[in-house]
Image (cartoon, grey):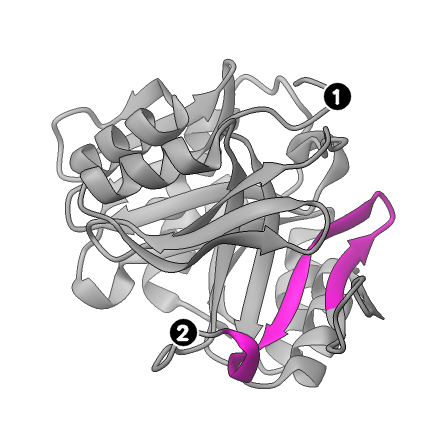
Amino acid sequence: MEPTYQHGQFMWHELVTSDTEAAARFYEKVAGWKTHQYYPKGSNEPYTTWIDHFGPLGALLSLERAREPGITPHWFANVVVRDLEVAVDRILEAGGRLVLGPEAMGTVGRWAVFRDFQGAKLAVFTPKDPLEARHPWRHGGIVWNALACADHRASFAFYQNLFDWQRLDTLDPDGPNEQIIYGAYGKPLGSMSTATSPEHQGWTFAIGVADHEAAVARAVELGGSVLPAASETLAAAGVTRMLDPQGVSIALKTQMPENTPSLEKEAGSLNR
């Protein structure tokens, strides 16, 4: 991976939730993250970031500040693009819709939040200056980005056109559990599959943890719940899908070193 973020790479994950204090406690105990609050230049409202021992990795927002009426707590992610206006045009031409922007993101760049043609939410971001990149499998944080949707092949075509993502592998090709492992610059970023039901559609982001069993136990003690239908299937892959105490879909994934041969196949199981 390049030392700075490149077009098509995930760079910032944001939790929008109904109880930011409870969420901060939960993710600190489960993932080891801290929060840092500051006032961005020119703003009279505080901004809270997630921080681990490698530095910032995302943000924590309240539902009241989300500027999207009628939503429920959720995670979404920012993906770097070379040209924000070109990206927005491609989103709209392919049937997506804008939620916010395009607009300035403080002093660091410009962004736009959108929902794709099947309703999944992401954001696109063009930095003002190059930003040092985190490597998910070396630095931890969010290590896998899985999309379950009504038509995963159509979604891959949408995002391939938008981000130049590559199809790195296909699990169970043409079968009932087909999954596309996608990535950028030859490195896996996540997986796409067709959801088993409408309520399971959307993005699920996997947090890398060193001790999987201990992290799951802490999550349950703090009010999280394991999704039974997925847990048995994914146990062998070191993945547990859960809901956090505010009902947000997440996953815990055993941290794996870069270049592990089975990386894509094990992490891809997150969609099932």
Q: Label 1 to label 2, Cα distance in Å? A: 34 Å
Residue type beneath disc 1: Pro
Label 1 Cα crowd, 10 Å radius (few <14 / some 14-19 / many 20+): few
Q: On the image, numbered disc 1 is attached to which residue?
A: 3
Residue that lies at the very extreme toward the top in this rendered image: 186
Q: Look at 54% across and 45% down and name the residue there.
A: 238
Q: Nearer the viewer, mark 1 or mark 2?
A: 2
Find out whether residue 204 is within the magenta segment: no
Label 2 Cα crowd, 10 Å radius (few <14 / some 14-19 / many 20+): few
Query: In this rendering, does residue 205 appear at all?
Result: no
Q: Secondary structure at mark 1?
A: loop
Q: For this view, does 105 lie left or right of residue 76?
A: right
- Give coordinates of residue 102: x percent, y percent: 46, 51
Height in image: 140 above or below 66?
above
Height in image: 272 above or below 69?
above
Find out whether residue 60 is within the magenta segment: yes
Please give the range of residues in magenta.
48-66
Residue 68 marker: 2
